[in-house]
Image (tube, rainbow, N blue to C red):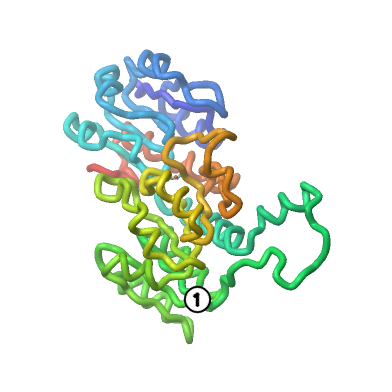
């Protein structure tokens, strides 16, 4: 008997082909919107595997609704949408899609660094509103990116890719992790003149950096990690970028801090509650650049992520080695 699986969204054809070649497949036939919860709970009743997105909550309720479930293949590197201890307790395997999105997400981090530092979106808006009258010495002045000190909080795969790009901008790099990373340091120092330093104390990194990039996973330890106290430590000229998970930041406190001008500006790809609407208070601030959780959103990378998730799903159900197990 072929395994039965459910895909919670319409996926690129290359991924669907991998799944349908090996499994009886049903799926939520919509690309744009998540499957309604009730539909999902009914759809998983008889399945051996599900391919999920970060918009799907995989919790005890879902596990109860899916008694035959053996694998959840999440199409993301992050898996804070999944109750991992509950899966593990029931012997359900979780897989994710690391590596394939690293460089693409680092590119988006850099788009936010540059846009926030150089007021790119504010300038666009100003022109669109007919507000550009002339060139003047201090008109729309921003902060230099080249030569600025970059502080990376969470130098894992994506944080390291952000650091590699900083070498081209001549930026000294500070990074804060639980442990130093000799491999990352060696990579950066391979370029003559490039500098990188491990900073064990987060406060020191915040005080010394011109640009702070947050790339930590969302865990009980990192939830609410950045609030009024942390922002007050940053330089009044600093730029703050978060492309990890929204709840790592206490958003109301960031808004207050941005209103006070410390940090000087922020670039955010993720939010406490997604999606945010046009009435969100962040949109009233001139010194923010917002993107709608699109760190990995290129055609090539999203296709690769879907293919990797599909490959994990099929491998787990057909007795092959699983490329990206989280809890095996
Ligand atoms: C992830 O993979 O965790 C991202 O947030 C979506 O690309």
Name the spot of residue 252 as percent of width and height, x first: 42, 44
Name the spot of residue 210 as percent of width and height, x first: 47, 70
| Residue 303 visible within the image | no
Name the spot of residue 27 as percent of width and height, x first: 47, 22
The residue tagged 1 is 171
Question: Which quadrant of the figure contains the N terminus?
Answer: top left
Which residue is pictured at 25% across the width and 19% down the height?
Answer: 64
Answer with the quarter of the image where residue 251 lies: top left
Q: Is residue 253 left or right of residue 109?
A: left
Which residue is pictured at 43% across the width and 76% down the height?
Answer: 188
Name the outermost residue toward the left. Answer: 89
Name the outermost residue toward the bottom. Answer: 192
Which of the four quarters of the rendered structure image does ligand 1 lie in? top left
Answer with the quarter of the image where residue 154 lies: bottom left
Question: Which quadrant of the figure contains the C terminus?
Answer: top left
Which residue is pictured at 42% across the width and 21% down the height?
Answer: 24
| Residue 220 visible within the image | yes
């Amino acid at each position: 008997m072929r395994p039965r699986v459910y895909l919670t969204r319409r996926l690129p054809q290359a991924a669907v082909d991998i799944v349908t070649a090996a499994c009886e497949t049903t799926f939520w036939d919509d690309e744009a919107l998540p499957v309604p919860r009730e539909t999902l709970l009914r759809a998983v009743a008889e399945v051996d595997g599900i391919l999920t997105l970060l918009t799907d909550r995989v919790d005890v309720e879902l596990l109860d609704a899916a008694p035959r479930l053996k694998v959840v293949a999440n199409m993301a590197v992050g898996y804070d949408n999944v109750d991992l201890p509950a899966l593990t307790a029931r012997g359900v395997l979780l897989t994710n899609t690391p590596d394939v999105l690293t460089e693409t997400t680092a590119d988006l981090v850099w788009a936010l660094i540059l846009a926030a530092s150089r007021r790119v979106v504010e300038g666009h808006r100003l022109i669109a509103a007919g507000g550009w009258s002339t060139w003047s010495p201090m008109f729309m002045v921003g902060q230099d990116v080249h030569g600025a000190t970059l502080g990376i909080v969470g130098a894992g795969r994506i944080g390291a890719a952000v650091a590699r790009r900083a070498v081209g901008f001549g930026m000294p790099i500070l990074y804060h992790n639980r442990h130093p990373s000799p491999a990352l340091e060696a990579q950066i120092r391979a370029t003559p003149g490039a500098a990188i330093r491990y900073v064990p104390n987060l406060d020191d990194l915040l005080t010394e950096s011109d640009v702070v990039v947050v790339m930590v996973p969302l865990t009980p330890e990192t939830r609410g990690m950045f609030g009024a106290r942390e922002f007050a430590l940053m330089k009044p000229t600093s730029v703050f970028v978060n492309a990890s998970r929204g709840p790592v930041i206490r958003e109301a406190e960031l808004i207050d801090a941005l209103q006070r001008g410390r940090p000087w500006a922020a670039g955010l790809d993720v939010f406490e509650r997604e999606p945010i609407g046009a009435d969100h208070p962040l949109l009233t601030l001139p010194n923010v650049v917002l993107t709608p959780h699109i760190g990995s959103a290129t055609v090539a990378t999203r296709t690769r992520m879907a293919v990797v998730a599909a490959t994990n799903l099929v491998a787990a159900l057909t007795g092959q080695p699983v490329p990206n197990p989280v809890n095996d």
